[in-house]
Amino acid sequence: MRAIRGLWRWRRNPLRRATDLVEAWVALVALVLIVVAAPLLGSFVGAAAQGTLQRAVRQQQHDRHLVMATVVRKLGGAPVEADPDAAGAHDNRSRVLADWTAPDGTRRHGPVLTTLKSPHKGDHFDVWTDQHGVMTARPLDSATATTHAVLAGFGAALLTAGLVEGGRRMIVWRMVRRRYARWDQAWDRAGPDWGKAGTGS
């Protein structure tokens, strides 16, 4: 990492400028933040996301119910792509007209997507509904929620490290520009005759 390169400026050297020492301190602070703060922040974000997602998992598992539907007839049209979160996401789904009973006992009837390869009248298949029998997506499972939480924490750590490194580069860039500006001013004060024989005599 480039932040480490600035640390050599701490060594005793008659040519060392004050800005070299400042740049070394900026590099050290950036290194500590990347090594310590970024993982801590990533862990905090991951833990917060895990808590929120696991609550959502419990809520969805409470609110959503798996019920059995019965095919009335197949509906026309091309097969529909499956939900990417579904277990059989590689399978195409067919639209059928189906009957099912909601968890509250209400009889339901309507178009439904099914993974049956060749649905026929009277075939049974499972669907996810809410308490009133309205179709819904399957509930989020705990393992998927944990995966999302880990990715959130990892992303937060990477973002923090990137911001710290970007801040370090911005500070160093401004210091270099200021240094070049001072050199230009010094050259302007020296005048166009600097170095010529007899100048200033």
Image (tube, rainbow, N blue to C red):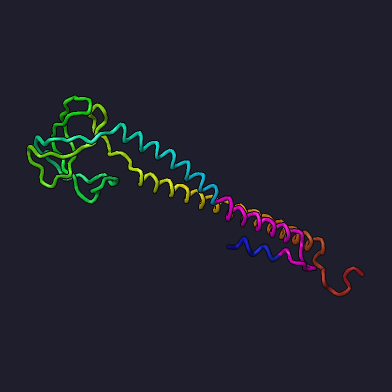
Q: Nearer the viewer, residue 5 or 15?
A: 5
Is residue 51 rendered to the left or right of residue 12?
Answer: left
Q: Return the x and y of residue 69 as percentages of the image width and height.
A: 15, 35
Q: Return the x and y of residue 98 as percentages of the image width and height.
A: 13, 34
Q: Nearer the viewer, residue 160 or 183?
A: 160
Is residue 113 rendered to the left or right of residue 41?
Answer: left
- The answer to which quarter of the image holds residue 30 is bottom right
Q: Which segment is the magenta one?
A: 9-38
Name which residue lies at 10% across and 46% down.
Answer: 118
Name which residue lies at 30% across and 31% down.
Answer: 63
Task: Specify the farthest residue to the right.
Answer: 201
Residue 1 part of the magenta segment:
no
Q: Which part of the image, by quadrant, shows the N terminus?
A: bottom right
Residue 14 part of the magenta segment:
yes
Q: For the stretch drawn in magenta, what is the main secondary structure? A: helix
Q: Which part of the image, by quadrant, shows the C terminus?
A: bottom right
Task: Specify the farthest residue to the bottom.
Answer: 197
Is residue 109 rendered to the left or right of residue 7?
Answer: left
Q: Nearer the viewer, residue 26 or 150?
A: 150
The correct choice, above or below, for 18 with respect to 163 in the image is: below
Q: Return the x and y of residue 27 as percentages of the image width and height.
A: 65, 58
The correct choice, above or below, for 62 with respect to 13 in the image is: above
The correct choice, above or below, for 191 with respect to 149 in the image is: below
Is residue 48 rendered to the left or right of residue 24?
Answer: left
